[in-house]
Image (cartoon, rainbow, N blue to C red):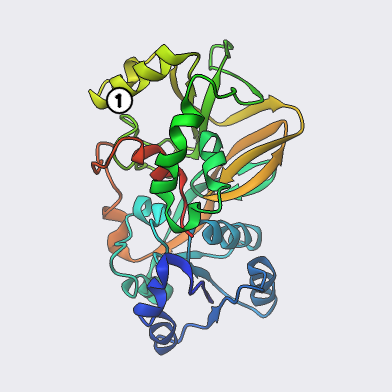
Amino acid sequence: MLFLNPRSGGGKAARARLAERARERGIDVMALRPEQSLAALVDEAVAEGADALGVAGGDGSLAVVASAALAHELPFVCVPAGTRNHFALDLGIDRQDVVGALDAFAWGVDRKVDLARVNGRTFVNNVSLGVYAEVVKSEEYRGAKIATARAMLPELLGPDAAPLPIRLSDPNGRPLDAVRVVLVSNNPYHLDGLMGVGVRAHLDTGQLGVLAIEIGDASDAAALVSLDTTGQIKRYRGWHEWSAAELIVEGEGGVAAGVDGESIELDAPLRFESLPGALRVRVVPWAEEGAPSATKTVSHDVLTNLWGVAAGDR
């Protein structure tokens, strides 16, 4: 069964006539309407005997279907019909060949990759707290992600902005103060700075990637931008990056978050965990050879990396 979101990627699936191509291959297709619940449709398909679950849509949709594939021990097929298709990229799937990804249903190979959870909610890419979570809540965001982020950043990253209402410590147990950005990912991203597009070299390390950025005052904000523009971001004293199988972020009440690009509120404390080898992904055979290396980056304007990684696909 292929679940298809015709709105994702600005109508990418429709332009590729993806539903028609899938049915020609004998694949059952369910095109989603705005009022429908994807989770309910997936449960219905499983009850009717679906032997594989695929999705052509944004990464938020992927997480819903991947969670069901995990629960029912079914193979999962990722079709890159969203905007950025981060999960497909890191699986080694050709994001330009939307129709070709359908071949995984008939003669794909299975790979075990990790998933991750926060407070019981599955995610395939990442959860962002702080600055990015504020950006995704804006009404303008869906139509112009990067432009909206850049317009809001001066105020959100400036010295007058309030730190996050959370408590987080580094791997040595030292509390981090004045945290403005937290990114927790399903496997670590390769992040050389705030420029470029981050990728994950592996999706099977059994580890979460954790990035926290502290900005205490105006001099810190200036140093962050300066070091980023000269390619020395990891010299910034408030840049903290590590890996862990689990992470607990303390706090009180609700915490604004972006989960695979979806704006939601999570109840503190936030409990993150890696689910090693939880998902059986079915991909075309050559995708195993195409996973990006840890040094692959694509240059963009300042801050595109962080927002691009956290943006998800809608």
Which one is nearer the viewer's eye here, 129 or 108? 129
Q: Residue furthest right?
A: 253
Residue 178 position (above or below residue 146) = above
- State the residue in front, 296 or 312: 312
Q: Quadrant of the N terminus?
A: bottom right
Residue beneath the point at 44% across and 42% down: 149
Q: Looking at numbered disc 1 in the image, what kind of residue is underneath it?
A: Asp
Residue at the location (72% across, 30% down)? 269
Q: Is residue 42 above or below residue 25?
A: above
Figure check: 308 above or below 295: below
Q: Identify which residue is drawn at 36% across, 36% down.
A: 303
Residue furthest to the bottom = 24
Tell me the crowding category of disc 1: few under 14, some 14 to 19, or many 20 or more residues within 10 angstroms, Cα based: many
Tell me the residue at 58%/47% (across/down): 137
The image position of residue 204, as x and y in percent, is 44, 43
Q: Quadrant of residue 252?
A: top right
Res. 204 visible in picture: no
Residue 187 percent across, percent down from the top left: 46, 39
Q: Is residue 179 visible?
A: yes
According to the image, label 1 marks what residue? 228
Is 48 left or right of 286, judged from the image as shown?
right
Is 218 on the left or on the right of 37, as rendered? left
Label 1: state its secondary structure. helix
